[in-house]
């Protein structure tokens, strides 16, 4: 299958999507040649895919060092990043080295930020192995680590040379993580493409059953939609904010419950219902459509209500979110199913009421 | 006086050079408007210039927080950077904030890297207060912190919105630091512009006496030369390497003697003599010109010989330098006074002999 292209001028790159791609040396060859390569991966991913990737890199002419970090969100911190730099420097990798991010969104963010900053920037490949990473974090060049005061507060925009999304890796994904990835797929339909949303309503069970054709279509269409938005707004000045549909509430949920209690996708799922509720109260979305959003989220086995943190606590948590420009709260609302828009002029009363109506 | 322009397309920016510019609100106004601003500076610079800069920013409509870090090279480390992030997050500065780097090269590198990575990148202004920073580190967008295994190993290319180089700040510079800055000025003449080199030979005493006209000319011509090179090679793929004349040996000196023992400019001064010696032995520079380089360095009160570390130790230290592409040692040599070129094919014997001939 033809790869997707993310059209970013001199930083344009292909996304290869399909079954069994991790082992295809031909996909690595254009980027590797005689380069020295470091594969950054996590302890859990290592036994599953590292050997296959190193063999393919070797067949493509690359000598691949492995840098294995701890699993989970806690890897997105300075201490872990410093260990990655240390391994690269210890192996004397120069500015012509290539990094490979093999794993989920955490590895993509961490290894991508390492690539953005190691010796002022080296190229990298994204090999996402979770649905969330395949549909979301591997497209757009956002990389980051967390800070004690907030998630993703330190990072860079750094586009990969290519993304290789092998849908067979999703076979090893725990069910809860698969569903969390589906939340971002649904987001793309809700915010950007009604037709895709209707395809999801018709094919949700196939996706959850991990049918490869359904997975490949969901990943491809999500990446296409995201790539179109990113190509028009690489640095998140405007249009790209629409991809944050559900995320203002979602981040508040993650922060308010303590990171890791809710998976990111779960928080976004409840956040999307809350944002749909706010859209209806702000007069931009029909009430029946809110119920349609809620029903789809529930069918996907995702939380359709936020935790009861209290409206004031939500507002406080959202106020610290970096998407609040100049202190004002901005929301991505739905104007209709498949069409999101940015709103910055909402009555805070509506926000409070929507929170109260959409939590447990 | 008209500002210089660094021609980098959408990342182009002006460099303002002159006496008393730090207090001119009009220079800040186009970048500030109603923005929230954080001035990053060091403990030693704070009492000298912070008040003046904050007053000018206020007159330009900006509300300026101060973030004061420790003095010296040790500030270029993660712990200090993290304190900068912490101050910015604590003050709830968003992605529309503006950072201002007020100080020497260390502050420029640290605050520039903070700007490159805070919330995935915010704009910044460079206000260099040392000669070295004015002629060198404030042009080109290189930012970095150090790693235990090497200097500037973690960083980014991040261009400022503008540079404001106020030559009156050089009045407060210790004599040794002024001379270290002169080393980089001489480098621009030696590597890129014979006419400027001859101007330096004729006006060195005026520079060292801090005559404002001479300083302004030296800063302006250095920035012009560097800006031309950077504009043609933003990411240091080729031509920009010529700016590293003297730096391969210089970094070895800094590393081999322990950072801080030799100032960067002092190490580069001796490194330039060593590189001139190597140029002569490689057959590209006349012997008389090596002596002319040595004489100018000595007249500037800079070390014209490297420390006696032993040739093998130099080679070992240079081999870890990030400018060694794929393990091979590359050198910037002089083809004539005012004209440098990159060479990667040198007989290691010549390198050893040159080191032996040019150390104490």
Image (cartoon, coloured by chain):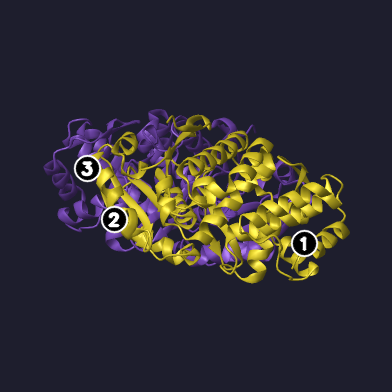
Chain colours: A yellow, B purple
How far from the left and from the top, in percent, is residue B349? 11, 43
According to the picture, the residue beneath numbered tag 1 turns out to be A358
Is residue B305 in view from this perspective? no
> On the image, which quarter does residue A274 sit in?
bottom right
Classify mark 1: helix, strand or loop. Answer: helix
Say whether marks 1 and 3 touch (CB < 8 Å).
no
Same chain, marks 1 and 3?
Answer: no
Residue at the outermost left position: B349
Is residue A267 in view from this perspective? yes
Q: Residue at x 59, y 59 (%)?
A: A264
Q: Residues within 10 Å of mark 1 (few under 14, many from 20)?
A: many
How far from the left and from the top, in percent, is residue A347? 88, 55
Q: Residue at x 46, y 48 (%)?
A: A116
From the viewer's perspective, tell me whether residue A353 is left or right of residue A52: right
Q: Residue at x 31, y 60 (%)?
A: A47
According to the picture, the residue beneath numbered tag 3 turns out to be B328
Pinpoint the chain carrying mark 3.
Answer: B
In-front residue for pair A44/B20: A44
Classify mark 3: helix, strand or loop. Answer: loop
């Amino acid at each position: 299958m033809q790869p997707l292209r993310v059209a970013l001028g001199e930083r344009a790159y292909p996304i290869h999507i399909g079954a069994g791609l991790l082992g295809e040396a031909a996909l690595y060859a254009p980027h590797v040649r005689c380069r020295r390569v470091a594969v950054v991966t996590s302890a859990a991913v290592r036994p599953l895919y590292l050997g296959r990737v190193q063999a393919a890199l070797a067949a493509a002419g690359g000598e691949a060092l492995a840098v294995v970090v701890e699993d989970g969100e806690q890897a997105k911190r300075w201490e872990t990043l410093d260990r990655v730099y240390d391994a690269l420097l210890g192996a004397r990798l120069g500015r012509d080295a290539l990094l490979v991010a093999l794993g989920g969104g955490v590895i993509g963010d961490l290894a991508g930020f390492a690539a953005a900053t190691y010796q002022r920037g080296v190229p990298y490949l994204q090999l996402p192995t979770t649905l969330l990473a395949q549909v979301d974090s591997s497209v757009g060049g956002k990389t980051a680590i967390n800070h004690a005061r907030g998630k993703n507060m330190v990072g860079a925009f750094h586009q990969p040379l290519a993304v290789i999304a092998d849908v067979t890796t999703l076979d090893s994904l725990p069910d809860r993580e698969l569903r969390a990835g589906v939340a971002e797929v649904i987001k793309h339909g809700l915010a950007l493409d009604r037709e895709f949303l209707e395809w999801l309503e018709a094919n949700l069970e196939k996706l959850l059953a991990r049918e490869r054709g359904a997975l490949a279509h969901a990943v491809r269409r999500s990446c296409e939609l995201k790539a179109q938005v990113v190509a028009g707004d690489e640095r998140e000045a405007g249009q790209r904010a629409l991809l944050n549909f559900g995320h203002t509430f979602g981040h508040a949920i993650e922060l308010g419950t303590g990171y890791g209690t809710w998976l990111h996708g779960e928080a976004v799922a409840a956040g999307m219902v809350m944002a749909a509720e706010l859209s209806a109260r702000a007069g931009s979305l029909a009430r029946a459509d809110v119920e349609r959003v809620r029903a789809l989220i529930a069918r996907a086995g995702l939380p359709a209500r936020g935790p009861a943190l209290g409206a004031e606590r939500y507002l406080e948590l959202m106020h610290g979110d970096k998407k609040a420009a100049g202190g004002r709260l901005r929301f991505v609302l739905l104007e209709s199913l498949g069409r999101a828009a940015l709103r910055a002029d909402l009555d805070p009363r509506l926000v409070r009421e929507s929170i109260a109506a959409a939590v447990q």
